[in-house]
Amino acid sequence: MTIPEKDVVSHFCLKGYNKYYTDSATLYFYPMTNDESIIKKSLIQCKDSYTTILNKKNLTGKKMDNGKEKNAIERIADAFCDIKNNNNDIVLPPPPQPDDVESFLNLLGSRIRKLTEKEKQEAFQQHLQLSYEMLRNNRHN
C-alpha cells in the first residue's frame, strides 16, 4: 500500500514509536527504537513478530557487483548473442491450431466485415440472439 509521506508519522505501524527509518531502496518505513535499532513488524502465524533487522549505524550500501552482475536486459541480450554466434537457431513452438469454433468465428467475421455498418449491427444481434436461444434450450433439456 502506498501512502503519502505526510501520513507516515500517523501510520498504525508506528504507534508507540517516536522515530522511523525509510529504506531508500524499497521506500518501506520501519519503526525505530530509542537505541536506533530498526524493527521489522510482520504477521507470522496470526501473531505480530518483531525482529531487529538493522542497526542504523551499520547501514551501508553494498554492491555485489564485481564486474559480473548484469541487469536482466543485458542477460537476455547476451543469450541472444550466444545463440547467434553459435549459429543456433531459435526454435519456436508451433502456433496453436484453431479448433472448429475458432475457425467458424474467423469465417463468420470475414463475411460480416463485407457488410455495411447497419448490416453488421443486425448480424451481431441475430447471432447473439441465436446463441442465447440455443443455450437457453439446452438448459431445459
Image (tube, rainbow, N blue to C red):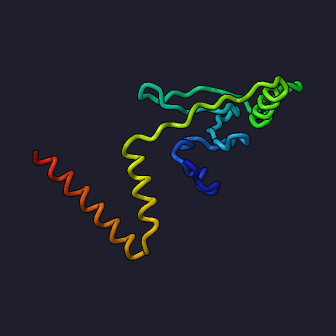
* Residue 134 visible, this orientation: yes
Residue at 40%, 40% (x, y): give it.
99
Q: Split into 4 quadrants, where in the image is the C terminus?
A: top left
Q: Quadrant of residue 83?
A: top right
Left or right: where does residue 8 sit relative to residue 106?
right
**x and y, in percent, of residue 15 in the image:** 53, 43
Front in this rendered view, residue 36 or 61: 61
The image shows residue 68, relative to residue 20, as above or below, that is above
Of residue 98 and residue 13, the one placed in the foreground of this image is 98
Q: Is residue 17 left or right of residue 12?
A: right
Which residue lies at the image location 44% right of the left edge and 53% below the top edge? 106
Residue at image coords 74%, 34%: 72
Q: Quadrant of residue 21?
A: top right
Q: Position of residue 16 (x, y in %)?
A: 55, 41
The x, y position of residue 38, in whole percent, is 66, 33
Q: Residue furthest right?
A: 67
Res. 60 in view: no
- Residue lying furthest left in this view? 141
Counting labels gives 0
- 71 or 41, which lies in front? 71
Q: Is 55 placed above or below 132 here?
A: above
State the image coordinates of residue 87 (x, y, percent, origin top left).
81, 25
Residue that appears at 64% across and 42% down = 29
**Residue 33 picture quarter:** top right
